[in-house]
Every structure is written in C-alpha cells, then in structure tokens.
Amino acid sequence: MKKVDVVVVGGGPAGATAAHELAQKGHDVVLLDRAGRVKPCGGAVPPRLMEAFDVPESILVNQVDTARILSPRGEKVDIPVGDGFVGMVDRGPFDEWLRTRAASAGATRITGSFKSIERQKDGSAVVRYTAGSSRGGEERSLGARLVVGADGALSQVARQEIPDSDQGKFVFAYHEIIESPAETSEAFAPQRCDVYYRSTLSPDFYAWVFPHGHTTSVGTGTSIRGFDMRSAISDLREQTGLATAQTIRKEGAPIPLKPLPRWENGRDVILAGDAAGVVAPSSGEGIFYAMTGGRLAADVGDEALRTGDARILAQARKRFLKTHGQVFWVLGLMQRFWYTDDARRERFVAICRDRDVQELTFEGYMQKELVKARPLAHARIFFKNLGHLTGLVPA
C-alpha cells in the first residue's frame, strides 16, 4: 500500500486549492476526485478571488457589470457594480483548470470514488476508494498522514470522522444550463445578473438568471422539501422568454448555509469548502469561501505535518470565522427575516433602491468583509431598515 503525506478527497475549488497549496509547500499529495460531477452554481467570482488565488481573466466566460433584483410584484432595481466587474465561470472548465494547476504543482491526480477511512494498528489513516469513473472499479487503498475532506455538502469524510457533522443546514439548488439568447431583451442582458425574489420561484431563497457568455444558468434554491424546483424553473424560463432556448444540461445538489461546529477530528482529518459548510447565507456564494477554506486547510495541515501537533488543525475554522464570521451572521439574519414571505421580500427590494445600500453591498462583496469605513452610511441604512420594518416607509 502506497503511503503519502496528504490525500485530498474532492476536486472542486476547495479540494483543488488545498492540493495545490500543500503540493507547493513540498508535501506528497494525492487529489482523489470523481470524474464528470459538476455542481449547480451561478458561477460568480469577485475580483478579490482572482487576485488572492492568482486566477487569470482568461478563465472567465463573462464579466457582469449590473445586478438586477426583482420583487414579487415585478418591481426592478438595477444595482451597478461600480468600478470593476463580477467575473463569471463555468464550473466544469473552471474546476478542471484548478485541478490541472494542482497537478502542475506536484499533486498526483487519481480518478475514483471515496469509500471509507480505516485505521492501521498504529492508528494511522487508510483511505479506501474505488478506482476509475464507474462504480464497478477496483477497490484500492492509500495510507495518509492527513486527509482533507472536500467532498461536498453531504461529505462522507465528515460523516465518518467529524463529530456533529450532521448539524448542517442546507438549501437544495437546481439549475438548467441553456444556450444564451442572441438578442438582448428586457428580461435578459448578457452583462447583467437577474435575481428573483418571489415565492412561486423560491419560497425561502431566490431564483436567478446568470449569463455565462455563450450559455446561461437559470436556477433556484430552497430548503423546503417537496417544492417543485423543476416546475419553478420552467415557469421562470417561460416568463423571461427563455423557454425555447436549447437546454444543455440540468443539475441539482444540496448547498450548505451554515459552517459546521467542527471541521477536524483532532487527529488527522480536516474539512474544507461545502464539506465544512462555508457557503454564504442569503447570497449562496460559495466559490470564494471554498477556496479560502482550502487554503486554510493547507496552511494548518502544513503546520500539523511539520510539527506533529494535530491540535493546530482546529485553527482553520477559528481563522475563517475571525475574518468572515460576522459577514455570515449578518447574511444569515437577513435571509431568516427578509426571505420569509413575499410582503417582506417586497420591502427588501425597496430597501435595495437606496444608494447607500447599493454601494455598501458591492463594497462588501468585492472586499469580502463588512465595510466599516463609512459609519454615517451604516446609520442611514439602519434607520431606513427600521422604517421598512415598522411599515412607516411604503414598499
């Protein structure tokens, strides 16, 4: 049985980033990934991600300069990005580019499906997996000093190794990738992301139309089981004139909206990305936070491997929440309040007409932290929110 320093389970943005950075640090890394799995995702990436993770503009399939939000009654608010743009990626080619980069740094790629983690007599981890892209492949094993679980929202690594990993909260997402219309219309613009707050399209989240250049993602999400997401997307495509566009593929998967209470087993396993629950509430944004989690897993994993002190693994979650925990808390509070019914959604969209709200929203999105440099703007937003909450301001 071959033994390596690290086995990374899952080759999405979190796992590929962890594998890339651990290999760069000189460790013997195996990246284990199932072939052909593409997660439903709007595909938005902020410039901060491209700068922090050295992602070239050439990997982008589109650059968006406006976000349009639409209320249940059909009221529209266009929010300009301001200086710069929001990049769009197609997750299939983007994830493959990240995996290829990890291999270029020295990680060994293996196509296969994770089965289990077992223990040798000395307590060290053995990763068992089925080789190949089909379920009928040969079962094989790898010894590992460290295992990074980046295998998605329903992580099998987490279920086997991490206490309280069943406490995650999820939105179930579904989208259809279609050919983009050749013509711009009121309902579709190639440089604009449209977000629909309407209970018939999503009872507790939102639906979207995100252009990816030659293709477009039309999707929705909800935590309510039984809601017919396929019918909702069919209705949205009909309403926006996208019903006749060719459908390229359809995808669905759970998306976590709450960081797990623990990301490591105190021994030799650490989680990253969706497996750790790091998708932003309210917005559902996950790529930047997944890659951030992958980097943190690599940082603390490197420290633990070099020092032999497994307690260091707990630092990944602490460092993540120190930087992003307040943003997640605010976004979670916003989702729990404003997304509960159409009357509140109507008021939420009305608030978004405010210039202070628009500017601070995009500053926060671009910088990936709450903007604290403009206290007067925050004060004005507080009183405007209070007016909408009490009904003193009409929706």
Image: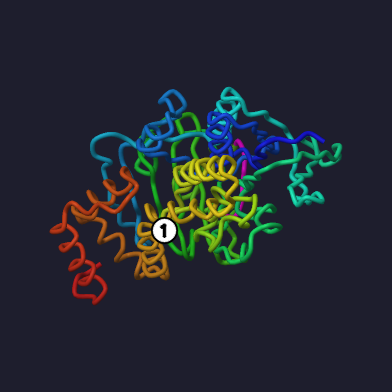
Which of 277 and 221 lies nearest the eye of the viewer?
277
Placement of the C terminus among the 4 image quadrants: bottom left
**Would residue 208 be counted in the magenta stretch?**
no
The image's colour scheme reads rainbow
- Residue at 78 percent across and 51 percent down: it is 119
User: Is residue 132 rendered to the left or right of residue 150?
Assistant: right
| Amino acid tagged 1 | Ser
x and y percentages locating residue 234 in the rendered image: 55, 51
Q: Which image quadrant is residue 132 in?
A: top right
User: On the image, numbered disc 1 is attached to which residue?
Assistant: 282
Residue at image point 57% right, 57% down = 172
Quadrant of the image occupied by residue 390: bottom left
- Residue, far front: 307
Left or right, 88 with reference to 150 = left
The picture places residue 52, in percent across and down from the top left corner, at 39, 35
Q: Is residue 222 above or below residue 89?
A: below
User: What residue range appears in magenta?
Assistant: 248-254
Q: Please count the marks in the image.
A: 1
Left or right for 104, reference 361: right
Q: Secondary structure at mark 1?
A: loop
With respect to residue 266, does 341 lie above or below? below
The residue nearer to you, when weighing 30 against 338, is 30
Say which quadrant the N terminus sits in: top right
Residue 7: give x, y in percent of width and height. Answer: 67, 39
Residue in front for this viewpoint, 69 or 109? 109
In this rendering, is residue 157 above or below 389?
A: above
